[in-house]
Amino acid sequence: MEQTETFGLSIKSKVSGTWQDSHPYAKVGGTWQRVLKAYTKVSGTWQTSYQWEYVYTYSSGEYTDQDFDNLGLDKTNNVRVIVPSGTIIIASSTSTYAIKTGTGYGGNLIIENRGRILGRGGNGGNGGTSGSGGSAGAAGTAGQSGGNAIHVECPLYVYRIADVLAGGGGGGGGGGSGGGGTANDITGSSVTYAGGGGGGGGAPHGVGGSRGSGSEGRLGSAGGTASLTSGGGGGAGSSHSEGAGSAGASGGSVGSSGSGASSGTGSFASGGGGGGAAASWMYNPSNHFTSFSNGP
């Protein structure tokens, strides 16, 4: 048995107990054509009761840097892009986007997210390195900021049905180098240095920072690379009796900033790097209308 009802601007038919989308047709000049928009007169005023929309559904899998202008969408009326559960769309770098919406839509663009849409995580900062001649070593560098998930180039409606839509997490700061001893007025050869640890990468997939170098082979450890949703851990700093390099800081999870690292210890120590900032889920330089909700 088939039962048909109107739901908002769509028509659905119940087939074997399940509601399914129905698409009305009208015969024009002897040819059946799809109805793009239907109107109903309510209290003397014609109101839209049905509007056809083009639906594009991603297959399960992982995608990078999706530009909707390259998907072959029919933009005549509304367009609904569905990211199903189990599908992941990620930016390949912090300077690109998981999704660029494209332009030229005749109706509304709707993204229905049941999967994961993520900006790229920032890389971790590098560990501080040794100085020379009795000067302090180089400080640990700051973690990189994360990247945005969606570049908004037109009015956009986002329905977050489940899972994650977020900007990339920030990278953790690199640990400061340590240094101590007595500086010689000429060579500074009596000062010993210890390298700082690299900062962890921000999620998703931010790369850990490189280890800092010290004198006499005292090297810090590199930071860890982030997973899909969790930031990488900071690398350990090296040490000696005169001072120690500090550990690198952890990278941020998706949508979270990285942590800042501490300074090394000793009279010739250097500072740790700051954590990278998390990115917003959207980049919208032209201030297009956006609507974000947890369901249609």
Image (tube, rainbow, N blue to C red):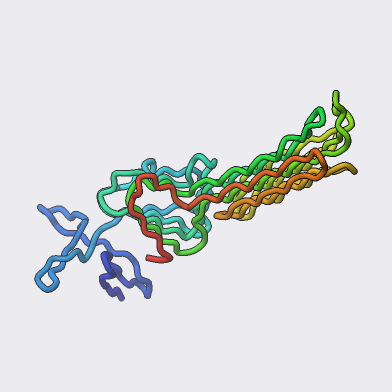
* Residue 207 position within the rendered picture, expressed as x and y whole percent measured from the top left: 65, 43
Between 181 and 87, the residue placed more toward the observer is 181
- Horizontally, residue 115 falls left or right of residue 128, namely left
- The C terminus lies in quadrant: bottom left
* Residue 86 position within the rendered picture, expressed as x and y whole percent measured from the top left: 53, 57
Counting every numbered tag in the picture gives 0
Q: Quadrant of residue 157?
A: bottom left
> Residue 135, can we see it?
yes
- Point 26% across, 70% down: residue: 6
Between 125 and 16, the residue placed more toward the observer is 125
> Residue 227, can we see it?
no
- Point 55% across, 55% down: residue: 255
Between 121 and 62, the residue placed more toward the observer is 121
Compared to residue 108, the image places residue 237 above or below, namely above
- Horizontally, residue 142 falls left or right of residue 41, namely right
- Point 88% across, 37% down: residue: 181
Q: Residue furthest toward the front?
A: 185
* Residue 162 position within the rendered picture, expressed as x and y whole percent measured from the top left: 49, 64
Q: Residue furthest toward the top?
A: 186
Between 256 and 37, the residue placed more toward the observer is 256
- The N terminus lies in quadrant: bottom left
- Horizontally, residue 103 falls left or right of residue 35, namely right
Compared to residue 56, the image places residue 181 above or below, namely above
- Point 77% across, 44% down: residue: 264
Q: Quadrant of residue 25?
A: bottom left
